[in-house]
Image: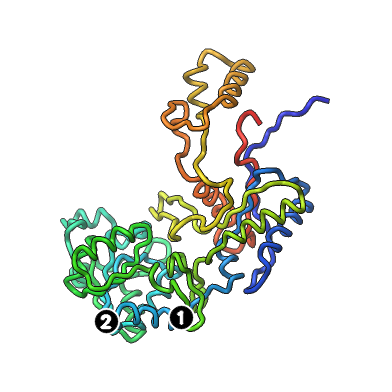
Amino acid sequence: MANKERRVGTVSRGIRCPIIREGDDLAKIVADSVLEAAECEGFELHDRDVIAATESIVARAQGNYATVDDIAADVKAKLGGETIGVIFPILSRNRFAICLRGIAKGAKKIVLMLSYPSDEVGNELVSLDKVDEAGVNPYSDVLSLERYRELFGVNRHEFTGVDYVEYYGDLIRECGAEVEIIFANQAKAILDYTDCVLTCDIHTRARTKRILKDAGAKVVCGLDDIMNAPINGSGCNETYGLLGSNKSTEDKVKLFPRECQLLVLDIQKKIFDATGKHVEVMVYGDGAFKDPKGKIWELADPVVSPAFTDGLIGTPNELKLKYLADNDFKDLSGEELKNAISESIRKKQSNLVGNMASQGTTPRQLTDLIGSLCDLTSGSGDKGTPVVLVQGYFDNYTN
């Protein structure tokens, strides 16, 4: 009997796992969970399948936590404990509020400088339309809290209903520090208030630090410089510090996982030993996509994937089928068209940069694309699938 033609391309499956606790053998749990799912659901593993584990279970297994008091001690030691400028934080109860508690406990006064009309990842403080109506230039104008309220009043976040200006101000005061809130988008505006600055932006942090240092700031730290070494036996992240951290309890954060390259290699080996298949493995956090309704860019982690096997290095190298169909082979149809396109794919160059037939394909890192797929598959709530198996991602029309 002739082989049937495959009718399915990429498949993404959420894999249910036990609840992970500190000290668990995560490589064994992940590998076993995938193998059990395959047996239970009746599918097979193949070479170049991708197994992805969410960063939260990796950090949890590592026990990578820090308390508000640990953060306070580090902030005080590095920024002097007097008046600290805290600039460009994102508006998030889960991501930043608990870090802010620690920062406030490590200072006498916080000058909180919020970017406007929105934070770095798109959470709006005020709509751009309102800024236009007020005749304000967000690139150059520095607003006091009083001026902000006079112009814009109270603005609650569309999804959470929180007035982050009030929320962050109250939180700082509750931690025993004075607070002054200003609104500006030029980093050096903070230097009119203090020369000790903690910049809390994620993806623009290197530029912000450079601007502040060039403008004469005495001390400049980023969130990546706080908790980048253990404090009183705490966890830490040598590369990212507080970046990528999440609220764990009211006084504790779960940090981004530490060095986890050995973990992905261990999972890869366990699957090979059990099946003979060479899979790729990655750790993923936030996906890299934007919500057009809420205007929120998902990526609050410093990277999508902190660790991955070598087969996930690089970008896709794909031809655009509709370009070939509409241009090179516009006079063909049916089996003849299918064969011509299949032959083009088989003969494609290893690097299609500049080739018109690849225009419109996605020029992004494989780990960012697959990590986004995994983040959407696993969700951030109660699905209970912190591991995702992606099959057929590297297939094309000819497979």
Residue 226: where, in percent of width, then height? 39, 73
* SS for dot 2: strand
Asked if residue 391 lies left or right of residue 152, the reply is right
Looking at the image, which is closer to me, 312 or 42?
312
Badge 2: residue crowd in 10 Å (few <14, some 14–19, many ≥20): many
Asked if residue 213 lies left or right of residue 71, the reply is left
Q: What's the distance in space between the residues labelled 1 and 2, CA to CA?
A: 22 Å
Mark 1 or mark 2: whose residue is earlier in sequence: 2
Residue 2 picture quarter: top right
Residue 385: where, in percent of width, then height? 64, 59
Q: Which mark is residue 342?
A: none
Instruction: Identify residue type, mark 2.
Output: Lys
The quadrant in which the N terminus is found is: top right
Identified at 54% across, 27% down, the residue is 348
60 over 314 or under it: above or below = below
Residue at the outermost right position = 1
29 over 330 or under it: above or below = below
The quadrant in which the C terminus is found is: top right
28 over 228 or under it: above or below = above
Identified at 69% across, 54% down, the residue is 269
Residue 206: where, in percent of width, then height? 32, 59
Whether label 1 touches label 2, CB < 8 Å: no
Identified at 67% across, 62% down, the residue is 27
Residue 155: where, in percent of width, then height? 31, 65
Query: How many numbered marks are there?
Result: 2
Residue identified by numbered label 2 = 109
Residue at the outermost top position = 331
Name the colour scheme.
Answer: rainbow
Residue identified by numbered label 1 = 231
